[in-house]
Image (spheres, rainbow, N blue to C red):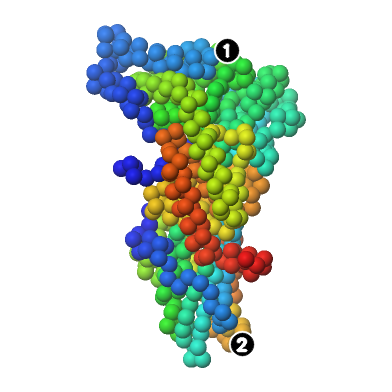
Amino acid sequence: MYSEKVMDHFQNPRNVGEIEDASGVGTVGNAKCGDIMRIYLDIDGNGIIQDCKFKTFGCGAAVATSSMATELVKGKSIEEAMKVTNKAVMEALDGLPPVKVHCSLLAEEAIHAALWDYAKKHGIEIEGLKPPKSDIHEDEEEGEEY
Amino acid sequence: MMGQSIYLDHAATTKTSPEAVAAMLPYFTDYYGNPSSIYSAGTAAKGAVMQARETIAATLGVKTNEIYFTAGGSEADNWALVAAAEAYASKGRHIITSKIEHHAVLHTCAYLEKRGFEVTYMDVDENGILQPEELRRAIRPDTILISVMFANNEIGTVQPIKEIGAIAREQGILFHTDAVQAYGHMPIRAEEMNIDMLSASGHKFYGPKGIGFLYIRTGLKLRSFLHGGQQERGRRAGTENVPGIVGIGKAAELAFQRMEENTKKERALRDYLIDRIEKEIPYCRLNGDRERRLSNNVNFSFRFVEGESLLIMLDMKGICASSGSACTSGSLDPSHVLLSIGLPHEIAHGSLRMTVGAENTMEEMDRTVEAIKEIVGKLREMSPLYEDFIKKNGQ
């Protein structure tokens, strides 16, 4: 069901943990849908992401996308981190099964939420950054067929 | 292929027993004749079908001509519900079932709702038991059918079927039970329990897949499921799945012969597993009733942990189990059964079902507990919910 890369990042997740006094923390998703992702960012004075950690409650794909997302933003500038989209995370993982695409959206949302927190704390504005949604699945409706 | 693994998913399916396979084989290559033909290869097949039907009828204490072979449990459920609803529609259009039925029943009910029937989905208590007195109160003058499963596939809770059957009989309402998880695992007497229709499936008790049956009590005027030839007394046309029927017959014979011995073994494994998990893993909850429970079922929720992650990690250690997590179902909602017994979503997502078989060993139970301990620990370390919980409550 999952690609080798997904399995690798699920079995050996990179950057699991917390950052004390993090520059920005973002938590997205909800327990109802079974996915909660929290991203910690350590951003230096030059706006470079020095460190990134995550904690995730969720399926294999949720863990793997969190892990990959942290890898993709580490060492990057805020601008570059803004370009880490769900598509980029998915491509880096060699794809996800269709039912798991929402997990990659969650990773993008989590990075944005952490950046939002950072921006708020420092009174700055990041171009293109929108306030985090409290529930990324609130617009979704399941079709019913019998 | 599955030799090295620890198979703890017997409620999903069982392996076909070697005895059943051996009984089936001649009906592929030697006695492959059509049971409807008059030459001897056909009559041999016909005789084998008859024998299987007799075996199964005897296990339920019913008449041979009340057993109708189907392609499995879902077909039997679909047939029973739709045909009964149609047949008694002139009397009323109200059906009662429970919230924790298998989707074969729930989705058929939803279909019937679209066709103008009204369905009451009964609540169950926190252990998954439907209270017969509540059921009695839900009955209306236009109620034509009650369908309540014998035992639940996820949490193993066994319903008070005899009481429910008695109420249905007293009120003159048809009573169907989906006994897919129970048949072959516990004694069922259709007449004593006032069961009018009962569904079962071969591969849940060491028979082959693709074969099941529906018991229909004599006197019920149900329409045919498939129209065509005169097979199954004209109610389910199509050339019989002779090897499958022989296989389910053999499996039923063995299941009832070995029931006492097998359930005793299963119960010991089940209780050992439950006991160790409860003692050794904090923040877990046993789902389902402790006493009124299938002998093979263990279902736990582990807080702060998501079920699919748990399953994949167990699989990597060669342990096959299942979960009520949304991620294993392809939808965003966790198991309707776990939600119906009152579990919050995040706890329902962290459920693990292990269903043992008589061939499992205590050593396998030990390995399983050790694996779960390690994996749950690892996933909790990774869980923001656990982090918040610890920060709030201390270690």
- Where residue B52 appears, as percent x and y from the top left, is 41, 17
User: At numbered mark 1, what does the secondary structure look like: helix, strand or loop?
Assistant: loop
Q: Would you place residue B377 above or below residue B163 in this image? A: below
Residue B22 image-quadrant placement: top left
Does residue B329 show up?
no
Measuring 42% from the left and 22% from the top, which residue is drawn there? B254
Residue B346 image-quadrant placement: bottom right
Left or right: residue B87 compared with residue B12: right
Q: Would you place residue B173 above or below residue B12 in this image? A: above
Measuring 62% from the left and 33% from the top, which residue is drawn there? B292
Chain letter belonging to callout 1: B
Measured in 3D between alpha carbons, the distance from the residue under mark 1 to the one under mark 2, in whole angstroms, is 79 Å
For mark 2, what is the residue? A123
Measuring 70% from the left and 29% from the top, which residue is drawn there? B132
**Frontmost residue, B62 versus B320:** B320
Q: Are marks 1 and 2 on the same chain?
A: no
Left or right: residue B368 compared with residue B283: left
In the drawing, what numbered circle is on residue B219?
A: 1
- Where residue B347 appears, as percent x and y from the top left, is 60, 53
**Frontmost residue, B132 versus B174:** B132
User: At numbered mark 2, what does the secondary structure look like: helix, strand or loop?
Assistant: loop
